[in-house]
Image (cartoon, grey):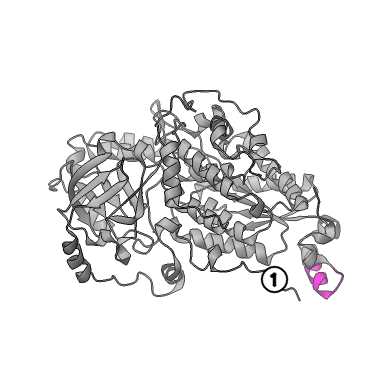
Amino acid sequence: MTRKTKDQLRSARWFAPDDLRSFGHRSRLMQLGYGEEDFMGKPLIGILNTWSEINSCHSHFRERAQDVKRGVLQAGGFALEMPALSVDESFTKPTSMLYRNMLAMETEEMIRSHPFDGVVLMGGCDKTTPGLVMGAITAGIPMIYLPAGPMLRGHYAGRILGSGSDAWKFWDERRAGKITDAEWLGVQGGIARSAGTCMTMGTASTMTAIADAMGLTLPGASSIPAPDAGHQRMSAECGRRIVDMVWEDLGPERIITDGAVRNAAIVAMATGCSTNAVVHLIAMARRAGVDFTLDDLDELGRTTPLIANVRPSGQDYLMEDFFYAGGLRALMKRLEDRLDTSCLTVTGRTMGENLEGAEVYNDDVIRPLSNPVYKEGSLAVLRGNLAPSGAVIKPAACDPKFHVHEGPALVFDSYPEMKEAVNDPDLDVTPDHVMVLRNAGPLGGPGFPEWGMLPIPTALVKQGHRDMLRISDARMSGTSYGACVLHVAPESYVGGPLALLQTGDIVRLDLPNRRLDMLVEEDELERRRAAWVRPDPRFQRGWGWMFSNHVTQADTGCDFDYLERGHGPAAGEPDIF
């Protein structure tokens, strides 16, 4: 393998030749306390750190950045840490999805405008993985992804709790009058008890597993719990490895291929992935110039068994158990015959080489293919006159009786309207009704918020019902469960068919045939379409205005149209004068 020379380092444009320009760059590093022996002729590694004091998923990243620096120094590189936008899922409103593309733009421009030869991307919370990776793909220099890792299992009163999933369940019991204030406080304090991302197979673990399966992390890095000492060792190894990647000129264009994206999709299906995987994986693939669609995902979903018995699609276990059972390498070993094991990874080796020696240590956590949690994959794509461009459902996480269902629609135009109605104990609703929330998509939300797991009406909760068919153009938290149809496209806010649905219309879901339809005559739909009035824009200026004018729909990844690869070539190297 041909290795770069010192003169071929990207950073050499900043630090050589010996002229006034490079004098300024060198003197400013000396101003920071470094000598020329620290940085001259060495790969300069940018550590893009999404740590913040309000992002509990990344609360350990201050220390992990130091572990990365240790590894970079050991390998003969020079590391500089830079903060990146910390889009946390818990506190960022109306939704962190509004800012995923901002993180992607920031990542691309930070890399391009600074003298980095390679970067370590530190993320984990839902949108940080796709945001960082999308930007780094476009920037094109060697990069390695460092996943935050899941938190430890939650505990309360002898019960093991899963973040998100159990919160919804306990909330329903509280609304039914079966949970006391003291018990509710105990659950609140016990459900998230360490640094790290949600310990269910929510969006965070889904996306880090996708990065892992795509070859962008050290093998199995996505499974290591955040507080585990192995996570510190992995972080240092990321630092060492990125230095070698620079010398090897191993950039993302050699790693993110058609085969790598397909591997990621197969693994996602087998893990019981979040529905959010659809939007992010398509966006990441399109940035890399890989043509990957909803139909490709559905095809893989029909043939890939769900073998990770991890909540919410699984029943009994959490990510900590998944790690002890062998983690993602073990799961991928079981899928080896279905994967393209020739794909190159950040290790410089193939996926097949990385899987050598992987074992499953608990067959109930990582099931054999002959005994899956669910015979098909995690997700299914629906089409019909309600969703001509597609919608997504998570079949394994909902009651099978809803796989084929027909019932009257109960339509809400906003979340506040829906919330007020479901809290009405006298709401006229039956378990056969189909709850519908619209104006919650990329433009309508705004930002495509996680409102899709509509709460079961109090009247039904008190009767013992815990699931019903729900439809929305919103997203849903990856920790959620239930008979929820999501990402309906085109969204209602732009005049998609969901905008024409009325309370009382009969809606039919036919999951085996992948259909979602409203049983309304076409001439009546034409009459409603002619009467529909486009809502006023959500934003008149700023980031929201930019988002609204350039974001694509759910079925194509919600990237900005001018950031997709098809819009034109990426910007070249910056001028230095």
Amino acid type of disc 1? Pro
Query: Is residue 544 rendered to the left or right of residue 64?
Result: left
Residue 25 magenta-highlighted: yes
Q: Is residue 344 left or right of 318 when viewed as pictured?
A: right
Residue 87 in view: no
Query: Which quarter of the rendering shows the C terminus?
Result: bottom right
What's the magenta region? 17-27
Label 1: state its secondary structure: loop
Residue at (15% x, 43% y) in the render? 430
Residue 511: image quadrant is top left
How far from the left and from the top, in percent, is residue 471?
28, 50
Horizontal placement of 195 versus 357: left or right? left
Q: Is residue 554 magenta?
A: no
Relative to 271, say whether 102 is above or below: below
| Foreground of the two, 503 or 300 | 300
Question: What x and y, as percent, mark residue 57?
Answer: 51, 46
User: Foreground residue, 556 or 302?
Assistant: 302
Q: Is residue 1 positioned above or below 115 on the image?
A: above
User: Where does label 1 land, which residue?
Assistant: 574
Tell me the quarter of the picture where residue 509 sits: top left
Q: Is residue 339 left or right of residue 43?
A: left
